[in-house]
Amino acid sequence: MFAHPAREWIIPPPDGVASRALIDTLGISPLTAAVLVARGAQTFDEAGAALNQEGGTCPDPFLLSGMEHAVDRLRQAVVNRERIVVYGDYDVDGACATALYLGLFNALGHSAEFYIPQRLKEGYGLNLDAVRRIAAAGTSLLITADCGTTSHGEIAAAHSLGIDVIVTDHHLTSDRLPDAVAILNPCKAESGYPFPGLCSGGLAYKVATAYAIKHGTPGWDPDSQLDLVALSTIADVAPLQDENRRFVHRGLRAMSTSERPGLQALKTVAGVDGECTVGTVGYTLAPRINAAGRLGDAADAVRLLLTQEPEEARALAGLLDRMNRERQQIEERLLSEAIEMVEKKRTTEASHAIVLASRSWHSGVVGIAASRIVERYHRPAVLIALNESGLGRGSARSLPGINICDAIAHGREHLEGFGGHAAAAGLSIREERIPAFRACFEAAIEELGRGLPCPRLRCDAELELSGLLPKMVRELARLGPFGAGNPEPTLVFRRLRVTSAKMIGQHHLKLTVRGRQGPVMHAIGFGMGSLESRGCSMEAPVDLACALDINSYNGTEAVQFRLKDLRPS
């Protein structure tokens, strides 16, 4: 059935010897040392690198297969004043990569154009009709931003119409690649690049950097675009490891004091004041930028990122904010319907996956709802929005360890098309083919997952309450920025006594707890419901898995817990 099993806490065994060596050598707290050891820091150099948010030297962009051909073709187009079009995707990553390319061409004194397809009318990736229109306008060079890896027919058509194509994309590839001037994709076989985790915003930055190295960009530094790179990296849930971590650290700093009018205006309408964090981007700024592509015209997001006019920036930011509020309302209705559909099947069906479809759903929002269905039921999910003619556009989301694209491929004969990443994908399908696809998909999930994995919470260390200080939390933050691929440290505290418990706000749980020794600590569990709903009571000790925050009040700072999970001891 679809009941959500309790999470298994995975806690690595402590290594006191290794921790003590890091404490003595690096002068760090036992807390930070324990987390570093738990995360596999085997040497002082590895531990030092983890503490260095600026990171080391980024790999040479020319290691990426095709980069030399790409920048030479760009140079040729600029020198010969050719018509260049950047063809971007309609999400944050595509918008940021598109804006970065246009910033590069503007710095080179070349006025390039851009094209973003309509999600609802044209779908993802290169569109044949759009390619024909772009060719008819006299374009001779097309650069993709976050699409193109699987666009064989469209790129062949572009070539026949006199357009050279440079692909910059990070979606999963097949054995056969399109016939383009260059395909810059760190995920392709033999890409030559040591880090496969770049998103398309990061790839555009690497192209700009390579161009600056070989041909020069007088008066313009690609590093001035790291705010866009950070925005796209976080929004696309790219792993915050290696150079991505450096990009995000520096990019967030730039966003916090941004001189880009569009981001200033977006922060204002979103109520963001002060320092930008990964959470600020992921939960506040990125959804507003994405709303343009979900409900309106994603070109408005690109214009917001490019404009130098404060008045235009305020107007565009207000538009995106309104669309985001509308998106939230649509999402809540869609999610409620999806949950009702799942609950109706729970008593009659047992399945390893969830595949749902409806003619009342909005295709621009099914991806968000699919993510929330996965979180709620711990099953890979595909949600499909059907139009009046019975053509469905679906979004799929997965669990760690199950490649959703591989699972979808088992039912490819029932699809009009599909593509994406290991964790998320999109597909198109006719309504009458959904039952057959559902059967193939569910069988594939069972086979690929060998039965669904038990939900797990990976923890870093088990601690006592005593001795926690705000300075330790600040030191631990040096391991960030935290996000995909580099989660914030999760710490376990056992056999605590709950001295008070109450519900606040929207189903948030607020606790005070005390151990055998040490002070009373405050904890907040967002959306966790009541103490009793978690199987706990004030009469019995509890175990907490939590992140550490600093609470400032009346000039006094104290460590507080942000709950990840809670269970009886």
Image: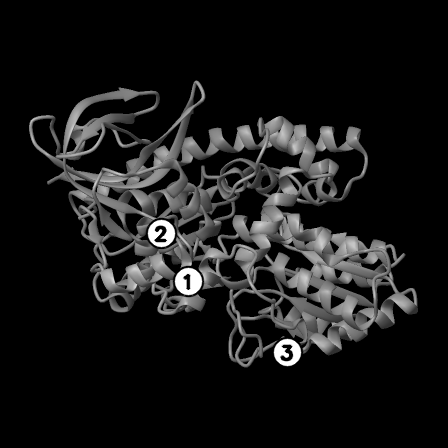
Q: Earlier in the sequence, mark 3 or mark 1?
A: 1
Mark 3 vs mark 1, CA separation in Å: 31 Å
Tag 2 residue: 32
Image position of 303 (left or right of 440): right
- For disc 2, the neighbor class at 10 Å (few under 14, some 14 to 19, many from 20) is many
Q: Earlier in the sequence, mark 2 or mark 1?
A: 2
Residue 65, numbered label: 3
Label 1 SS: helix
- Give coordinates of residue 484: x percent, y percent: 44, 53
Image position of 47 (left or right of 352): right
| Residue at figure coordinates x 29%, y 35% from the top left | 340
Q: Earlier in the sequence, mark 2 or mark 3?
A: 2
Tag 1 residue: 47
- Give coordinates of residue 464: x percent, y percent: 20, 42
- For disc 1, the neighbor class at 10 Å (few under 14, some 14 to 19, many from 20) is many
Q: What's the amino acid at mark 3?
A: Ser
